[in-house]
C-alpha cells in the first residue's frame, strides 16, 4: 500500500516507482485523437496542464500520454472496466481492453498531478468491486437544469461512477417532457418546493435536452437512469391530469415537503394507459438499459393494490425492452431481472431475502450511510435529519455486503449515493452536500473491503479540494479531515 498517493477510489494494486515526470504540457497519443484529447483536456486543463493531441508528435517539452486499447492482451483481466496506468519519468501509458478503462486510467492519472505539475512514477492495476456505482439525484423538490446536471456528470465521472439516476417526478413537479401526455410538464413542469421554479428557467427537460444530457454522460461512460415515481409521489401528475383521480378533478399543486399522501388507483380506467404510455415513452427516450419506476412510500395504498400498480409499472418497462429498477418497497413484486434500491435500514429484511431468492439484485443506498441529504452534523445549515447525521466517516465506514442482514453477497449489484433536494436550493448547496461524501461512497463501491480503510481515505481525500476548487465545485470542510492548505 502507498497511502501517500492521493487516489480516491483506492485502486486494486499500486506499485510506487522511482522518480517523477513533468506534466506541464502533455501530448495525448490515442486511437481516436479528437475524442481523447478533449476528454484529457477536460480532466487536466483545470489543474494547469496544457493538453495537445493528434497530428505529428511534437518533441521537446511535451510529455507523451499514450492510451492503448488492447482487448486481446494475453492474461488481460476479464473485468470490463479494468485498466493499467504506468507513470514513468519518460512518459505515461494507459492500457485497457475497453474505452471506459482508458478513461478510468486518465482519471487516476489526473489525481496524481501535483500543484508543481509533476506526477510520481507508479504502476496501477485496477478494476472495480461493483458494476453499479451511482448517484441518485432529486431534481424535483428543487429544479437543477442541464448545465448543472452536466457538472454533476463530471463530478460523478471523476470518482469513476457509472450511473446518474435522476428522480424526475414527485409531488412537487414533473421534470421530463412526455410526448403522449404533454400536460404533465405543461402544467407541472414549473413548480417546486416553496412555489414556482426560478424565473427564466423552464423547470423540466425537453425530450431533446434529455437526449443531449444522456449523450454528454455516455461520452464519459455515465448512464442516465430516469425515474418516474409511481404509485405514490404522484401529486404533480394528478395536478396535471385530473383523469387520474377518482373524481376526475385535478388536485392543487403541492409545494411542501411531506411524503406519502398522493397515489394512483388501480380500478380507475385512466391509470393503466397512463402507466403504460408514460413508461413506454420514457423507455423509448432512454439510451441506457435501465428505467426506474420508484415505488417508495406509497403509504395510502393497501398491499394488494400497491403490488398490482407496481407490477403494472415493472411489466411496462420490461415490455419496452428495459430492465426495471425500483425502491425496496417493491420487493414483493420483484423477481429475476429486477434491481431493487435499498434505502431504509429500519425496514424488515425478510421481503428482501425473498426477492433475492427469486433473483432480484440490490443497489445499496442505506440512508444512514449513503443519503447525502442528511446533515453532516447538528450545526449543518442544509439538510434533513430523520435518519440522524451522516458525517464523512459514516458515509465511508460500512460494507455493502452486510447492509441488509442475511442477504447473499452475490445479490449486491452495487452502491448509490442519494441526494434529495427538499432543502438543497442552489448548485453550491448541491455540491457541498456531495463533497466530500460522494468520493467516500465511490470508494465503498469501487474498492474491495480489505483494500481500504478510514485513516487512509481521510488522508488521501485531504488533497482533493485543489481539484474541486479548480472545477468550481463547492465542498464542506468537515473537521474529520486535516485538509491540505489551499
Ligand atoms: C425518503 S428515500 C424518500 C424521499 C425523500 C427522502 C428525504 C425514498 C425512496 N423516499 O421521498 O426525499 O426520504 O430524505
Image (tube, rainbow, N blue to C red):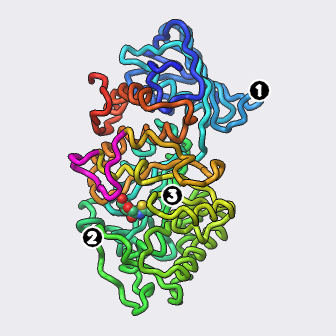
Q: Which mark, residue 108?
A: none
Q: Residue at x 38, y 38 (%)?
A: 393
Q: Nearer the viewer, mark 3 or mark 1?
A: 3
Report whether 312 appears left or right of 4: right
Q: Is residue 385 magenta?
A: yes
Instruction: Report if residue 419 is visible in the image.
Output: yes
Q: Which mark, residue 75?
A: 1
**Secondary structure at numbered mark 2:** loop
Mark 3 lies within 8 Å of ligand 1 (Cβ measured): no
- N-terminal label among 3 and 1: 1
The dominant secondary structure in magenta is loop
Q: Where does the image place residue 330, in percent across and percent down from the top left?
A: 55, 68
Q: Nearer the viewer, residue 454 or 184?
A: 454
Q: Is residue 222 magenta?
A: no
Q: CA distance from mark 3 to mark 1?
A: 36 Å
Q: Where does the image place residue 358, in percent across and percent down from the top left?
A: 68, 64
Q: Residue at x 73, y 32 (%)?
A: 71
- Give the residue at mark 2: 255
Report whether 320 appears left or right of 241: right
* Magenta stretch, residue numbers: 377-392
- Give the residue at mark 3: 342
Q: Where does the image place residue 336, in percent across and percent down from the top left?
A: 68, 62
Q: Residue at x 66, y 29 (%)?
A: 96
- N-terminal label among 3 and 2: 2
Q: Nearer the viewer, mark 3 or mark 2?
A: 3
Judge the density around disc 1: few (<14), some (14-19), many (≥20) Cα neighbours within 10 Å. few
How many numbered dots are placed on residues in this image?
3
Q: Nearer the viewer, residue 338 or 270?
A: 338
Amino acid at each position: 500500500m502507498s497511502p501517500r498517493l492521493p487516489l480516491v477510489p483506492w485502486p486494486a494494486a499500486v506499485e510506487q516507482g522511482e522518480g517523477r515526470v513533468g506534466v506541464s504540457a502533455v501530448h495525448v497519443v490515442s486511437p481516436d485523437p479528437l475524442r481523447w484529447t478533449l476528454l484529457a483536456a477536460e480532466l487536466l486543463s483545470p489543474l494547469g496542464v496544457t493538453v495537445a493531441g493528434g497530428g505529428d508528435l511534437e518533441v521537446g517539452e511535451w510529455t507523451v500520454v499514450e492510451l492503448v486499447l488492447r482487448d486481446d492482451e494475453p492474461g488481460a483481466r476479464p473485468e470490463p472496466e479494468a485498466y493499467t496506468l504506468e507513470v514513468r519519468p519518460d512518459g505515461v501509458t494507459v492500457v485497457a481492453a475497453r474505452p471506459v478503462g482508458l478513461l478510468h486510467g486518465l482519471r487516476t492519472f489526473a489525481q496524481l498531478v501535483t500543484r508543481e505539475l509533476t506526477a510520481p512514477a507508479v504502476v496501477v492495476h485496477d478494476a472495480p468491486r461493483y458494476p453499479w456505482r451511482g448517484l441518485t439525484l432529486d431534481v424535483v423538490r428543487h429544479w437543477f437544469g442541464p448545465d448543472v446536471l452536466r457538472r454533476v456528470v463530471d463530478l460523478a465521472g471523476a470518482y469513476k461512477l457509472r450511473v446518474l439516476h435522476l428522480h424526475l417526478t414527485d409531488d412537487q413537479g414533473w421534470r421530463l417532457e412526455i410526448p403522449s401526455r404533454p400536460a404533465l410538464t405543461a402544467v407541472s413542469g414549473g413548480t417546486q418546493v416553496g412555489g414556482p421554479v426560478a424565473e427564466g428557467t423552464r423547470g423540466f427537460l425537453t425530450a431533446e435536452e434529455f437526449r443531449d444530457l444522456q449523450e454528454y454522460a455516455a461520452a464519459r461512460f455515465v448512464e442516465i437512469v430516469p425515474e418516474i415515481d409511481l404509485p405514490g409521489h404522484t401529486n404533480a401528475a394528478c395536478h396535471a391530469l385530473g383523469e387520474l383521480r377518482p373524481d376526475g378533478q385535478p388536485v392543487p399543486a403541492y409545494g411542501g415537503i411531506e411524503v406519502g399522501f398522493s397515489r394512483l388507483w388501480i380500478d380507475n380506467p385512466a391509470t393503466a394507459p397512463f402507466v403504460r404510455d408514460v413508461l413506454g415513452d420514457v423507455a423509448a427516450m432512454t439510451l441506457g438499459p435501465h428505467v426506474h419506476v420508484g415505488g417508495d412510500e406509497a403509504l395510502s395504498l393497501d398491499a394488494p393494490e400497491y403490488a398490482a400498480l407496481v407490477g403494472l409499472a415493472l411489466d411496462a418497462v420490461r415490455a419496452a425492452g428495459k430492465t426495471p429498477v425500483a425502491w425496496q418497497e417493491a420487493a414483493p413484486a420483484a423477481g429475476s431481472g429486477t434491481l431493487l434500491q435499498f434505502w431504509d435500514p429500519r425496514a424488515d429484511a425478510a421481503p428482501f431475502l425473498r426477492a433475492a431468492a427469486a433473483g432480484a439484485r440490490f443497489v445499496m443506498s442505506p440512508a444512514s450511510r449513503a443519503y447525502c441529504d442528511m446533515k453532516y452534523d447538528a450545526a449543518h445549515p442544509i439538510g434533513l435529519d430523520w435518519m440522524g447525521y451522516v458525517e464523512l466517516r459514516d458515509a465511508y465506514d460500512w460494507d455493502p455486503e452486510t447492509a441488509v442482514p442475511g442477504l447473499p453477497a452475490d445479490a449486491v449489484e452495487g452502491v448509490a449515493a442519494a441526494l434529495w433536494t427538499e432543502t438543497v436550493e442552489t448548485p453550491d448547496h448541491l455540491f457541498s452536500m456531495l463533497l466530500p461524501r460522494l468520493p467516500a461512497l465511490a470508494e465503498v463501491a469501487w474498492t474491495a473491503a480489505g483494500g481500504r480503510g478510514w485513516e487512509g481515505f481521510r488522508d488521501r481525500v485531504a488533497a482533493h479540494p485543489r481539484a474541486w476548487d479548480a472545477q468550481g465545485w463547492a465542498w464542506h470542510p468537515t473537521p474529520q479531515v486535516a485538509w491540505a492548505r489551499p
